[in-house]
Image (cartoon, helix red, strand yellow):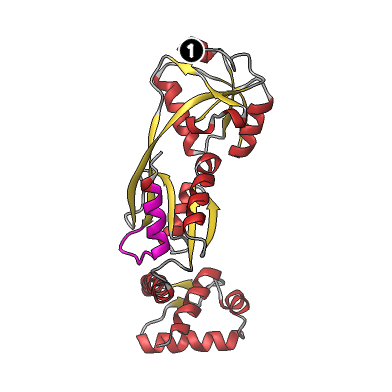
Amino acid sequence: MLLRHLRYLLAVADHGGFTRAAEALHVSQPTLSQQIRQLEESLGVDLFDRTSRSVKPTDAGEAYIECARRVLVELEAGKRALHDVKDLSRGNLRLAMTPTFMAYLVGPLVRDFAARYPGIHLQIFELSMDDIEAGLVNDSLDIAIAFTPVRSTDIECIPAFTETLGIVVGREHLLYDSISVLTADDIASLDFALLAPDFITRLSVDEYFRQHGITPKVRIEVNSVSTLLEVVRCSPVATMLPEAIASEDRALRKLQVASEAPQRGAAVLRRRNNYHSAAALAFVDLLLENRV
């Protein structure tokens, strides 16, 4: 059995047939079919049901395909280990963060990491929690900064810091210069612009309002943190985002509230029992040195 057989096997499974898989692999369909037949003969089982219009894995095929995926992930990790440079004079790091962290955390971290390790090539991705977990499991990401808990048992979490949410307004808002402490009734009277309901941050915001019996007046919903910040900067509306986002240079200010602000745990996520490069370990150390 060759590594090529496993790659061909996964291509057929992922593309749902031999024709599209052959196109993706840049090989002829007869060649691909022959290779899969060789693999089946070596294993003594049929891996695909070819009787239906679409090619589907058999039960044995499903089990073997999952094993093949894990094998290829481990081999890629091994390849990176061979090329890892312990002195951090060169290397690569694939880092992901959820959207709210991109608004205030990514800049200082990347600045400090790049200054300390200028030879490391950084790839940074803004992803949802679902995409982060998938990327860590399939080894397309090295580490991520996101929220806990996670669903996958294949991912380990290293607690990093606690993030506090606050009610934030821009200079166009009447309360921008206010030093008053807002009650629940005061908050209920505000016009809000919030992230869309599918954001994890929005879930925390909605839970805060529910716990304090507040029915917010949500006038605007957006699916981008950067867009939301622009809206709040230019409009007399409030929002609820991490307190660290509010700063004078952003023309944003956090308002004082009588109730306790919601908090959530942030962590470094990485694939459990995987090879972790020197660059990944160095980034984790840097983050933990400068806990928010």
- Horizontal side, residue 270 vs residue 117: left or right: left
Quarter of image, res 160 = top left
What residue is disc 1 on?
A: 182
Residue under the point 36% across and 47% down: 288
In which quadrant will I find the C terminus? Answer: top left
Inspect the image, locate mark 1, and give the three-letter code of the amino acid beneath it. Answer: Leu
Q: Is residue 274 found inside the magenta-colored segment of the image?
A: yes
Query: What percent of the width, then of the height, locates residue 13?
Result: 49, 71
* Helix, strand or loop status at disc 1: strand
Quarter of image, res 46 = bottom left
| Neighbours of disc 1 within 10 Å: few (<14), some (14-19), many (20+) | some
- Horizontal side, residue 234 vs residue 270: left or right: right
Q: Nearer the viewer, residue 288 or 209?
A: 288
- Residue 269: in sight, yes or no? no
Residue under the point 41% across and 24% down: 261
- View extreme (front): residue: 115
Identify the magenta region: 271-287
Residue 185's place in the image compared with 168, above or below, is above
Query: What percent of the width, then of the height, locates residue 177?
Result: 58, 15
Query: What percent of the width, then of the height, locates residue 51?
Result: 51, 76
In which quadrant will I find the N terminus? Answer: bottom left
